[in-house]
Amino acid sequence: MNMLLVGFQDVLNPATLFWVAVGVTLGYVLGALPGLGKATGVAVSIPLTFYLPPAAALGMLIGIAKGSAAGSAVSAILLNTPGEPSSAPTALDGYPLARQGKAQKALKMGLFSSVIGDFLSTLILIGLAAPLARYALLIGPVELSAILLFSLTFIGGLSGNSMIKGLIAGALGVFFATIGLETETFVPRLTFGFLELDDGIALVPMAIGMLAVAEMIIQAGNLRTLDSGQITDGTSREDRVILASEWRRCIPVILRGSLIGSVVGVLPGLGASVGSFLSYGTTKRASRTPEKFGTGMIEGIAAAESADNAVVPSSLIPLFALGIPGSVIAAILIAAFILHGLTPGPLMFVQQPRLVADVYAAMLCASVILLVVGYAGQRVFAQVIKAPLRLIIPGVLLLCSIGAYMETSSVFSIYVMLFFTVLGFFARKLDFSFVTFLIGFVIGPNLELSFRQSLQLLDHNAANLIRHPIAVVFIALTVAVVWWIGRGNRRKEAAVPAGAPDLDQSGLSRNQ
């Protein structure tokens, strides 16, 4: 608590608060623009923080992540086009409300639910990260190797419609992580004579290519649909404000969604989409009128948005406690944390307690700023997203190229970005999980190093695992997860009738 007070002293100054506010505002706009999101915004903005103080830089990036998670509901409600896949459940009831002339009511409930879920999840992060880190110090290479293997399998099985495709994507991510100098002998691997690859593939150009540029190419093929759709506001006060009766119905839903999103965020790799869909489905099943969901139930917006935004802070818990990214945004933030002197993992609470406190204080301040920015600028953001996407795409591509170049100050990074753009494009078209790919890439070096160390500690004898019960438990869990998810996928395939629409990772039909 003493360090947290010091963190507030570092953050509560005009310069730092300004950059946090810039991050929240930028993230909210990026989230509202269809096809963009927190991962894209953070990946592009990391090079822009090179010359900022650590507290301001990390506060700005976290502000982008928080603002984008809330802003993605704007396009979902007004255009029926989720800014991110995790906002797809928001569109199910938000867009019908907007078509009924209740767009302002839907936008306000989305904002309030987002802020409450985000704030409660941030408190959970502050309360749980350090205690978990103390136990994490007891985990050795054998246990860490088993935990990473379990996480990658769990992510691969749940990130898409096919466990096999998920595992393939995760394995490809680990494969690309092996490019560069080998960890023990420092022999170049898969560099093909390019000196730029000796240090491995940079995460930022890869993430920009797979997330932003690939998405822009896909969106460019659907311009006519995205440019259409005008929403008008209702004339009565009841259409623009949230009534007391609606608050009474939505408060339990928001609290439940915040809890679901926090739990999903703690589990590495599930992501915001799982949290929002799970919360929406739980609320629908618990409702007395489940048949009305999808026709304009405000509880649907509250359930989806509270869980969606609660995932962002809680996904940093495994990153801080174990050094394992719990989501794509956590994986991308690793580069920013290391750049500004904070290496994620249990030792950071001992080595950099003040900087950790700065991050916590910036996250709490970002939650308050998000409420102010979102409430004051909803009408403005609603106009921004109505701009023709054909005018937005060229500017986004320019920012992507600049962001990739600034990471290494080399044109080679732009080539890397374009290579992974092609890979990301086909990953989307073929329904391979790029989330699993990115997380596999991030944990790949740790997985390889801990596995090599485990071989030495076990003396190349699997029987010695009996001395490591935690590792045995996670290996058993890995086998159980593969069996359970595989069985569930077979049942799902058997239950889907012939001619049913094929759904992508966002839960939307591919032809939408």
Image (spheres, helix red, strand yellow):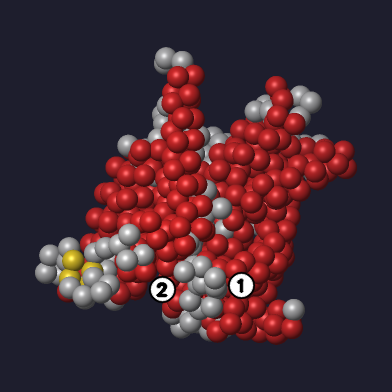
Residue placed at 47% from the left, 69% from the top?
A: 140
- Along the viewing direction, whichever of 295 and 238 lies nearer the viewer: 295
**Residue found farthest to the right:** 244
Label 1: few (<14), some (14–19) or many (≥20) C-alpha neighbours in 10 Å: some
Q: Position of residue 64 (x, y in %)?
A: 55, 63
Residue 80 % position (x, y): 56, 36
Quarter holding the C terminus is: top left
Measure the alpha-carbon separation of dots 1 and 2.
32 Å
Label 2 sits on what residue type?
Pro
Which residue in the structure is indicated by mark 1?
Answer: 134
Q: Is residue 152 visible?
A: yes
Looking at this view, is 183 or 291 the one in front? 183
**Horizontal side of residue 373 vs 209, given as left or right:** right
Q: Nearer the viewer, residue 253 or 296?
A: 253
**Mark toward the viewer: 1 or 2:** 1
Precedes in sequence: disc 1 or disc 2: 2
User: What residue is drawn where x is 36% and y is 44%?
Assistant: 167
Mark 2 packing: few (<14 Cα in 10 Å), some, or many (20+)? some
- Which sits in the foreground, 143 or 241? 143
Q: Position of residue 277 (x, y in %)?
A: 59, 39
Q: Is residue 22 above or below residue 111?
A: below
Can you give x and y, in whole percent of width and height, for residue 161 in the image? 43, 34
Residue depicted at 67% across the width and 47% down the height: 260
The image quadrant that residue 442 belongs to is bottom left
Horizontally, is 27 left or right of 410 in the view?
right
Secondary structure category for the residue under label 2: helix
- At mark 1, the secondary structure is helix
Camera sees residue 363: no
Q: Which residue is mark 2?
A: 47
Disc 1 residue type? Arg
Badge count: 2
